[in-house]
Amino acid sequence: MIHYKELGLVNTKDMFKKAMSGGYAIPAYNFNNLEQLQAIIMGCLESKSPVIIQVSKGARDYANQTLLRFLAQGAMEIVKASEHPIPVALHLDHGDSYELCVSCIESGFSSVMIDGSALSYEENVALTKKVVDFAHKYDVTVEGELGVLAGIEDEVSHEKSHYTDPDDVEDFIKRTGVDSLAISIGTSHGAYKFKLKPGEEVPPLRFDILEEIEKRIPDFPIVLHGSSSVLPEYVKIINNNGGDLEGAVGVPEDQLRKAAQSAVCKINIDSDGRLVVTAMIRKEMKDNPKNFDPRKYLGPAREELKKMIIQKNRTVLGSADRA
Ligand code: G3H
Ligand code: 13P
Ligand code: ZN
């Protein structure tokens, strides 16, 4: 067992407390490889933002759980040696079992999500409580989820969304002891969040449900998944360079900015990073057909991802200059 504090990581407790009172949200960026992690860490150091770096079950399977953990450990050495260190939490995204959460906690994660949202309410309560009981022995924070987000990802897939029922939240947090709660108010996973007819606008998030939840559990940290904006400039680069992402659409940034000013303390962004990387690689490949050095297309992708992260921290999350 290695405890996260030995690695210089923090749990999410203090981060969320400051985000709540400061009216901003902590960015939670997913990573699967070296370049994504470099971009996240360098982008957050440069913008002086606290950050949650998160790993899904799919990421662990793809990159090897040991290697991912050492990548995160290496990133922490860079953070500690920097002029202005920032708080970093290493988080399991969409943990689907008690065993997976325990394995992550034992290998140095400072925070885990147990996603029981597809279970019955009582099963969700029981599983979440079991994870909380273990995690809290090690001062690891736990995110639970109530309500179901639509969307299709490799490991996370639901056809239809069910908004979180405000009547459930108080009972759920009391009985489970979770430290934060992911809710469903109209966001969804992936790059096709809304099916729009020509001329139709993206429907607004259900801020009425969020407000009702805030009334029931005042000052409790709320998490938004599925919060990529699917930035049109990157979709355009992809489509102009051999890709086909017709109809890709995300959550408008002004809606996320509004959410960040509320009890929403953590905003999850994965697809936007995937789009940036794909756009830059496609462009580099097309512009330089003779190149076969991966550094020459992964490098620009990493640089653009870092820029996007700085921009998000400054203008969407409001987390820049808060570390
Ligand atoms: O919400 C899901 C995240 O974007 C992770 O996706 O399971 O394909 O790694 P993944
Ligand atoms: P996006 O697909 O909108 O980036 O959501 C990511 C997410 O919720 C990770 O848990
Ligand atoms: Zn998610």
Image (cartoon, rainbow, N blue to C red):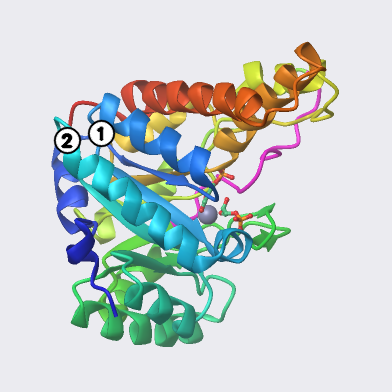
Q: Are marks 2 and 1 in contact (CB under 8 Å)?
A: yes
Q: Is residue 97 magenta?
A: no
Q: Is residue 212 visible?
A: no
Residue 94 tag number: none
* Residue at disc 2, CB closer than 8 Å to ligand 2: no
Residue 258 placement: quadrant = top left
Q: Main secondary structure of the magenta part?
A: loop
Classify the position of the C terminus by image quarter: top left
Magenta residues span 183-198
Considering only vertical position in the picture, is 112 above or below 260?
below
Under mark 1, the amino acid is Ser
> Is 116 positioned to the left or the right of 279 in the image?
left
Reading the image, the residue beneath label 2 is 323
> Is 281 positioned to the left or the right of 34 in the image?
right
Residue at the (41%, 62%) spot, across then down: 69
Residue at the (18%, 65%) spot, across then down: 6
Considering only vertical position in the picture, is 28 above or below 283?
below
Residue at the (55%, 51%) spot, across then down: 32
- Position of residue 210 measured from the top left corner of the image (x, y, whole percent): 38, 48
